[in-house]
Every structure is written in C-alpha cells, then in structure tokens.
Image: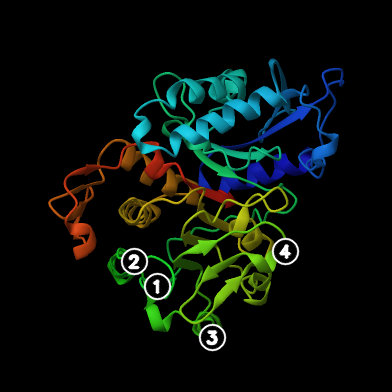
Amino acid sequence: MPEARTILRNVETASGVKPAIIYVTFVPSNAASGVVSSRQNPQNLSPETRNPNDQLELILVTSDGVPIRRRVDTAVREQVFKVANEFISQVTNVRSGRGYLPTGQKLYQWMIAPLEADLKAQGIENLAFVMDAGLRSLPVAALYDGQNFLVEKYSIGLMPSLSLTDTQYKNVNNLQVLAMGAAKFTDLKPLPAVPAELSMITPSLWKGKSFLNDAFTLENLKSQRQKQPFGLIHLATHATFKPGAASNSYIELWDTKLRMNQLNQLGWNNPSVELLVLSACRTALGDEEAELGFAGLAIQAGVKSAIASLWSVNDEGTLGLMTSLYQQLKQAPIKSEGLRQAQISMLKGQVNISSGKLVTSTQSISLPPELAKLSKKSLAHPYYWSAFTIIGSPW
C-alpha cells in the first residue's frame, strides 16, 4: 500500500499528528494472508456471499513499513455482529448505566488489542477506520479497554474507503462557517436549543453567518455559498433516513426537504467544503446500501469531512457537544482531534447542565425556557457524546 503510506506521511508532515488506517474486515477461515491494495474494498460483499463463520481480520497501515495483519481467530462475523448490536443497544440507552462496558470491552479486545503494541511502538495518535459492512454504525469512540475509552487515547474517524476520500490536509482555523437551522416544524417536534446553538457558533465562537427558521431555505443555502466559499457548513435540524431510493431520505429545511439525491447539486465540491457538521438526528446512520447515511453521501458530493450522529441525541446533549466542538476546533491540529477533545470534555463532566444553563470549561450558556427547567444533568454517558462521528477525512 505505497499510496496509503504516502498519504499518511503527508498528513503527518502537514499536521504534526501521526495517523494510521485500520481495515476491519472478515475473511474465510481458510484464506491465506495476502496484501490488500488500498484501492480494494473488502467491505462490499453482497449479504448472500457473507459467511457467518468468516474470521475477523485487522490490517494496520502506517506511514512506515509494510501493513500489519492480525487474524483474530476467536472472533467470527456472526459473533462480532451480535456483540456489536448489543453494545449499540446499551450505549444508546442512557438508563443502562455502565451496562455497555462488557460488550465495549469485548469489541476492544477483538478490534484494537491485537494492534495495540504496534500502535504504541509507532506513536500513533489518530485512527481512521475502514469498516466492513454492518459495522459502520458502531460508536468506535466508546470502545473500552477496562480503564479508558478508545477516544481517550486516539482521535478517530470513519472512511468509506481510502480511494473515495479527499485526503488533502487543510487547517480549518481560518475558514468561515455557514450555520443554518430550524427550531420549529409543522409536523415534527421543535428543537428549542437550535437558536442557542447557532448564536453560540457564530459569531460567538467562529467567524461566519447564521440563518434560522424562515431564512433556512434551499435557495438561501445555495446562494450564501455561491456568494462566499464557506469552508465549514453547519446544519441544525431534523433528518429522516428511509431505506431504498436516495430520494426517500431527507434533511428538513424551512421550505422544503433536502433529499439525499440533491446533495451533489449544491456545489459543495467547488471549492470543497472542508467540514460539514450535521447537527441532526441519525445523519450518519443509513441502511445496507448507504450505511453512512447523509454524511457518506455528502462525502460523495465533494465534502472532505462530515461530523454526524449515529442515533437521535437529545437537544441539550447536542448543544453541549457542538459548543465544545467549536471551542476545541480552534486549537486542534486536525478535525478529529477537535471532536475528540469535545467528547472527552463531556465524558469527564466538564460540559454539563446546571441551574438552567449549559456549563462548559470556558462559558455558561442560558438554555431556552423549554430546557431551562431541567435539573442538574450529567452528559458523561456515551449516549450523549459517542453518537457523533467524523466520516471521510479525519484530518
């Protein structure tokens, strides 16, 4: 994989962060250990050709040396999927307490532990996962080694594939943000934290423009970026993913539904949007054919990186994560490190709700009346922070 090594070396030189790519795939138990090309996509077997007894295999690619392969003989496809589904079910239930730890630890033992010595030996700081079909909705940040979550050790991202990812590094600190969202809907529950979210992002934390409710139209979304090539786009709204045709799934705008098959008409590849933040429900979750949901399609439409959620996170949890994210992106060398620091600030209790305010390490934000009545609330459970995933380039 000389091409992959060159990409990783360039990222390291430009950012000062040492990255690696981990392929998580399944192979027949009698398959020989060969070398996988960076342009191969071992993840896209049709469901009919997948054997439940295929063994888990990990391939670690770094900027130095040959790829490292580890076959995990004790883990087969059916078993890994079962544990992964249990883990997701527990992490998404805030009432589960710490019930997610045993499954999170088992997945860590299978997917991370076999490579841990190699990661430490090379001083790796960032992991980009290329996951087999069926595992792309896994909240990898919440995998647990018995003492720490994976996100406490590494910044993390998901790539559909290396060949489909724009890996050119660019620091986002000097880019402006176009932030848009809706708090009211005709047939959906309101999102009362969205006005606070938009006003907090810009101009409070980031240079740019924000548009709320009736200014959040498809025409305005297109025209604002045509007037100014915003490098960051932030959409705070509801989203609906439905299996089948791309036109079935959409993001709610004020005047219309932005359907999945319209994303490539927005001109987000000219020039490329460096980071799209989809502060909406389940925007990283799709079906078997588009498993990375809106975020995956945004990458195909020319966005370099997208931050999206794997499940419906409540309004105050999203506000907490987004507030911390834009604070952290200001000093992070790569995008996924900004997300990582935001997630750590939540899991360590540095972002929480108290006396009708969202409290972070640097500021206190008054919540809207609908949320201000909340009593003191911790946002440390991975339900609140591990839903958010960076897709495409983590750099």
Q: Residue at x 66, y 73 (%)?
A: 262
Labels 1 & 2 near each other (Cβ < 8 A)? yes
Of the residues under marks 1 and 2, which one precedes in the sequence? 1
| Mark 4, residue position | 245
Image spot of residue 125 (x, y percent)? 51, 35
Apparent side of residue 340 relative to residue 202 in the rendered image (left or right)? right
Mark 3 or mark 4, earlier in chain: 3
Q: Mark 1 falls on what kind of element? A: loop
Q: Residue furthest left?
A: 355
Distance (Cα) linking label 4 and label 1: 25 Å
Would you place residue 312 above or below residue 26 in this image? below
* Residue 154 visible in the snapshot: no
The residue type indicated by label 3 comes to Glu
First reached walking from the N terminus: tag 3 or tag 2: 2
What is the image's colouring? rainbow
* Whole-percent x, y for residue 360 in the image: 23, 49
Q: Is residue 230 left or right of residue 35?
A: left
Q: Residue at x 66, y 36 (%)?
A: 63
As measured in the structure, the alpha-carbon distance from the residue carrying label 3 to the one carrying label 2 is 20 Å
Tag 1: amino acid? Ala
Q: Which mark is residue 194?
A: 2
Q: CA distance from mark 1 to mark 2?
A: 7 Å
The residue under the point 46% across, 49% down is 333
State the residue at coordinates (47%, 56%). Answer: 281
Please identify, in this view, whether the residue under mark 3 or under mark 4 is nearer the observer: 4
Instruction: Name the residue carrying label 1.
Output: 182
Q: Is residue 283 above or below residue 217?
A: above
